[in-house]
Image (cartoon, grey):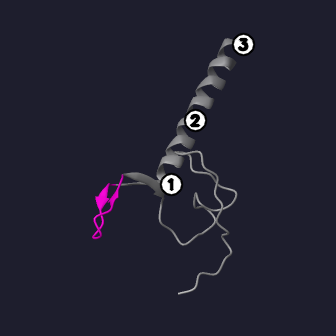
Amino acid sequence: MKKTFVAVLLFSLFLGLSFGSIAEARSVRVRSSIRRSGVYVPAHHRTSPNRSRLDNWSTKGNYNPYTGKRGSANPYRVRSR
């Protein structure tokens, strides 16, 4: 019984650490800066750059783990250039 409990505890700890590192890998820290117009942009996190619109924090169905805000952007909207 004791061995089973220890095995389950170690396995759950391993899973927790694995998923934590996966979540960290999908975010990028952006340093603070000052734009040419003089506007200060504070440091923040954003999703890692890729070609998908479905995994961004601002997309419907997702949420920002740092602010807790739910996404509202339509991922299928065609952007005009």
Farthest bottom residue? Answer: 81
Residue 56, image x and y in percent? 57, 61
Three-letter amino acid code at the position of disc 1: Arg
Residue 70 circle label: none
Q: Is residue 55 above or below residue 52?
A: above
Between tags 1 and 2, which lies in front? 1
> Residue 1 got which mark?
3
Q: Residue at x 53, y 48 (%)?
A: 23
Which class describes the residues within 10 Å of circle 2: few (<14), some (14-19), or many (20+)? Answer: few
- Residue range highlighted in magenta: 31-42
What residue is disc 1 on? 26
Q: Residue furthest top?
A: 2
Majority secondary structure of the magenta segment?
loop
**Residue pointed to by mark 2:** 16
> Magenta segment: does it hold 36?
yes
Q: In terms of depth relative to the viewer, which is nearer, 70 or 26?
A: 70
Tell me which amino acid carries mark 3.
Answer: Met
- Work out whether residue 47 or residue 20 is closer to the camera in this orientation and state it: 47
Closer to the chain start, of discs 1 and 2, is: 2
Q: Between disc 3 and disc 1, whose residue precedes?
A: 3
Q: Which residue: 36% across, 53% down? A: 42
Above or below, comparing residue 67 to residue 41 in the picture = above
Classify the position of the N terminus by image quarter. top right
